Image (tube, helix red, strand yellow):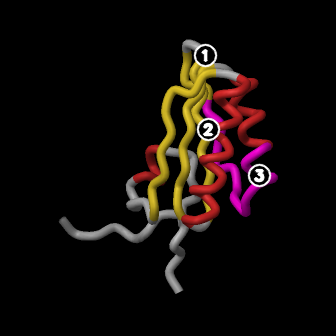
Amino acid sequence: MEKKLSLGIIETKGLTAAIRAADEMLKSAYVEIAGIERIGSGLVALTIIGDLSSVKAAIEVGISTVQTFGKLVASHVIPKPYAVLNRLTALPEDFCSESQEI
């Protein structure tokens, strides 16, 4: 059966807020951290993977946590991401759905 995992992204200003959000998200829903990337100028991108409902719930918790402990820049949930995202992010090779002809 094909994986139907989703990708959640939170971008923060400050590493402390990102780490605190990661901790709260892992405690609140069945998700895994795919990566924490320092972008520069204090910006940090936190990516999580899991089933769609868990990712949505975790992102909501993460947003709330970041707004308490830092500054939220952006957040987004991508259900069943396209395969090319494997090369653009730190996602596992087999995470995204197979390539489709365009």
Quadrant for residue 67, please give it: top right
Q: Amino acid at mark 3?
A: Leu
Dot 1 alpha-carbon crowd within 10 angstroms: few under 14, some 14 to 19, many 20 or more:
few
In the image, taking residue 101 as reference, residue 13 lies left or right, namely: right
Give the SS element for disc 3: helix
Give the magenta-colored segment's residue range: 24-37
Q: Is residue 36 magenta?
A: yes
Q: Relative to 77, does residue 2 appear above or below in the rendering?
A: below
First in residue order: circle 1 vs circle 3: 3
In the image, taking residue 89 as reference, residue 36 lies left or right, namely: right
Of all residues, the one furthest to the top in this rendering is 41
In the image, taking residue 32 as reference, residue 100 lies left or right, namely: left
Q: Residue at x 72, y 48 (%)?
A: 25
In the rendering, which numbered label is found on residue 63?
A: 2
Q: Amino acid at mark 2?
A: Ile
Q: CA distance from mark 3 to mark 2?
A: 13 Å
First in residue order: circle 2 vs circle 1: 1
In contact (CB < 8 Å): disc 2 and disc 1: no
In the image, taking residue 58 as reference, residue 7 lies left or right, namely: left
In contact (CB < 8 Å): disc 1 and disc 3: no
Residue 39: image x %, image y %? Answer: 55, 24
In the rendering, which numbered label is found on residue 26?
A: 3
Residue 55: image x %, image y %? Answer: 60, 57
- Give the residue at mark 1: 42
